[in-house]
Amino acid sequence: MKDIVKSLICPPMILPVVTMSESASAVETNSAEKIVQKQFDAYNARDIDAFLATYADNVELFSFPNTRTAQGKEEMRKRYTLRFSDTILHGIVTKRIVMGNTVIDHERVRVTLPEGPGVMQAIAIYEVQDGKIAKVTFISGKRTPGETL
């Protein structure tokens, strides 16, 4: 009887078992999320060099599902230098999903639209390889003039 009471009060310690593949996956996930967050912070700071430093030299940008819109850092530099000249540019991540080397963000970005200041929404699917963002696929969402973050 003592043994039964003792086992109920002091159950044996259960430790999680982590295999090498799970551990490697956790490190990969952590690294992917960190590099995506680093690029997002540089985006908000409008720091083109810090922003581009998070991308692979041969990065590819796509519009969902598979229309390539840019390839390589030089094309990105042209595109984002113009974007970073918008003085109201600021983004927030409303939701983030991380699985392995893939990070999916739902983003809301304050920008100057043709109609004036507003917010555009997008889903960005980042794929990280060797510590750099190698591919991004964007799903464009609503553009709302007059809206604030």
Image: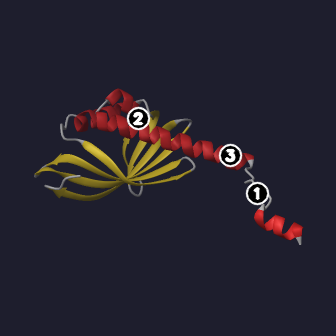
Considering the numbered disc 2 on the image, is that residue within a helix, a strand or a loop? loop
Image quadrant in which you'd find residue 81: top left
Residue type beneath disc 2: Gly
Q: Residue at x 20, y 34 (%)?
A: 85
At x 53%, y 35%, the residue is 131
- Please tell me which of labels 2 and 1 falls first in the chain: 1
- Amino acid on which the number 1 mark rests in the picture: Ile
* Residue to which mark 1 is pinned: 14
Q: Is residue 141 above or below residue 127?
A: below
Mark 1 surroundings: few (<14), some (14-19) or many (≥20) residues within 10 A: few
In the displayed image of the protein, which residue is found farthest to the front?
2
Q: Name the mark nearer the viewer: 2 or 1.
A: 1
Q: Are marks 2 and 3 in contact (CB under 8 Å)?
A: no
Task: Find residue 17 and report its horizontal and vertical position in percent.
Answer: 75, 53
Q: Is residue 71 visible?
A: no
Point out which mark residue 138 bears: none
Outermost residue toward the bottom? 1
- In the displayed structure image, the side of residue 79 where residue 71 appears, left or right: right
Q: Amino acid at mark 3?
A: Ser
Tally of marks: 3
Provide the residue designation for mark 3: 23
Measure the alpha-carbon separation of dots 1 and 3: 18 Å
Q: Is residue 16 left or right of 88 when viewed as pictured?
A: right
Q: Could one spot residue 116 in this view of the protein?
A: yes
Badge 2 is on which residue? 72
Question: Relative to 59, is 140 on the left or the right?
Answer: left
User: For numbered disc 1, what is the local secondary structure?
Assistant: loop
The image position of residue 140, as x and y in percent, is 31, 56
Classed neighbour count for the residue bearing mark 3: other residues with Cα under 10 Å, few (<14), some (14–19), many (≥20):
few
